Image: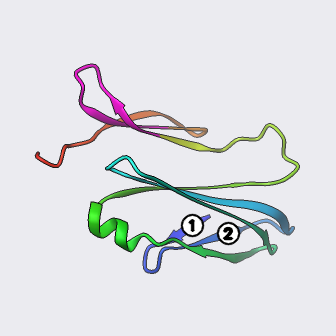
Amino acid sequence: MHLDLSNYSVAVDNTTNAPLNGLSVSARIYSLDDKLLQREERRDAVADAVTEGYKLDLAPLLTSNGILFVKLFRCCRGRAGESREIKIEYPMKSGNGEAQLAIRGWNLSSQIVQVASSGS
């Protein structure tokens, strides 16, 4: 999956020789003011091709917040137990009370990112 930053559209890249039917194509958008927006649709991905998904209305959120975290993920029916999800936890508080963002995933070690306050 990928997000086209020129128009905020989500698409599914199927690089296999077989179609993938019934994919759950999901997006979660996290803003620094602790808002979560979600969108999910089902798609059939043609073999060895890009399948158009949907557009995310990110422009107003970027204008008001300046930064967003967008998490894209897909799930295939019939693949029980397979999880390639990347988890984003926000807001979190460090031991000294500062805001943090935690990123954990199937192919990366846990990462903690300090989030600067708007007054910094």
Labelled pair 2, 1 in contact (Cβ < 8 Å): yes
Image quadrant occupied by the C terminus: top left
Which residue is located at x 70 percent, y 76 percent? 51
Is 100 magenta? The answer is: yes
Which residue is located at x 33 percent, y 67 percent? 62
Crowdedness near tag 2: few (<14), some (14–19) or many (≥20) residues, C-alpha within 10 Å: some
Image quadrant occupied by the N terminus: bottom right
The amino acid type of the residue labelled 2 equals: Asp
Q: Which residue is mark 1?
A: 2
From the viewer's perspective, tell me whether residue 71 is left or right of residue 58.
right
Q: In the image, which disc is placed on residue 13?
A: 2
Residue 17, quarter of picture: bottom right
Crowdedness near tag 1: few (<14), some (14–19) or many (≥20) residues, C-alpha within 10 Å: some
Helix, strand or loop at mark 2: strand
Residue 31 screen position, x and y as percent: 37, 53
**Residue 118, above or below 70:** above
Residue 91 screen position, x and y as percent: 37, 37
Which residue is located at x 76 percent, y 41 percent? 82
Residue lying furthest top in this view?
95
Helix, strand or loop at mark 1: strand
**Residue 19, above or below 34:** below
Which portion, as a residue range, is magenta? 89-103
**17 or 12, nearer to the observer:** 12
Is 36 magenta? The answer is: no
Residue 70 screen position, x and y as percent: 47, 57
The amino acid type of the residue labelled 1 equals: His
